Image (cartoon, coloured by chain):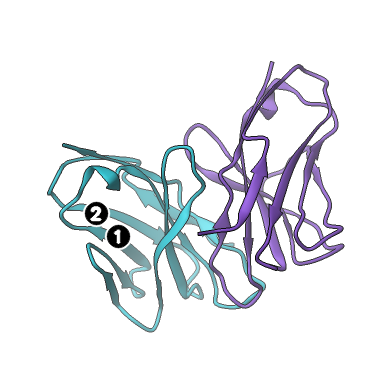
Chain colours: A purple, B cyan
Amino acid sequence: EADIYQTPRYLVIGTGKKITLECSQTMGHDKMYWYQQDPGMELHLIHYSYGVNSTEKGDLSSESTVSRIRTEHFPLTLESARPSHTSQYLCASSDVAVEKLFFGSGTQLSVL
Amino acid sequence: GENVEQHPSTLSVQEGDSAVIKCTYSDSASNYFPWYKQELGKGPQLIIDIRSNVGEKKDQRIAVTLNKTAKHFSLHITETQPEDSAVYFCAASRDNAGNMLTFGGGTRLMVKP
């Protein structure tokens, strides 16, 4: 069973609010990822990290930002949420030498 | 970059029947092909993977086949059960630590009891 946790599980907020989605893993993995999943199911990579102090933008442009100060923690922040940010956000991690991704259960974000 | 196409987007089968999901990829250098299953309310989970040095891999009721010449690979589920109902994703990547998986668009499989 994957030891990767996302909080909150569900979040409903108003436009303009600043939010942080939390992601933590206890597997010691160096690589971590954030995916945005639209209602049509498709997974879009928005951020990834190879290790502490490393962050990169993914294939899908996103107004969110990430940080990687500790190996186990990879939070995602939206400075000013908008309805267009409404989506499911999935965090994942992997060992550098192995391609297998471990996913968290996701955060369903709704911006009103 | 890599592009992965997945079909069908939805698939409905009767319990006990077989289900087949197909994917094509564009990068001939890709050599790692995993399949992920996403159950309702959960994140995707790896169920089987195959590398380009083999043409087929089986694990109980699921199997994956790979045709490198045609650049396509398929997931086969036999004797489907209601608990197989989920969204399935194929993916492809080059086999080194720096490369990212490229996912297909997903297939929603519904197994009717």
Q: Position of residue B30 (x, y in %)?
A: 50, 72
The chain that hosts pointer 2 is B
Q: Foreground: A108 or B100?
A: A108
The chain that hosts pointer 1 is B
Label 1 element class? strand
**Dividing the image into 4 quarters, which one contains the N terminus of chain B?**
bottom right
Q: Identify the residue at image location x=40%, y=79%.
A: B52
Q: Identify the residue at image location x=55%, y=77%.
A: B95
Q: Identify the residue at image location x=84%, y=52%.
A: A67
Q: Mark 1 belongs to which amino acid?
A: Leu
> In the visual, does A55 lie left or right of A97?
right
Are discs 2 and 1 both within one chain? yes
How far, Cα to Cα, is label 2 from label 1?
A: 6 Å
Q: Mark 2 belongs to which amino acid?
A: Val
Q: Foreground: A6 or A90?
A: A6
Q: Position of residue A109 (x, y in %)?
A: 65, 29
Q: Position of residue B24 (x, y in %)?
A: 38, 60
Q: Quadrant of residue B23?
A: bottom left
Q: Specify few, some or many for label 2: CA neighbours under 10 Å numbering under 14, 14-19, or 20 or more.
A: some
Q: Which residue is tagged 2? A: B20
Q: Specify few, some or many for label 1: CA neighbours under 10 Å numbering under 14, 14-19, or 20 or more.
A: many
Q: Which residue is tagged 1? A: B75
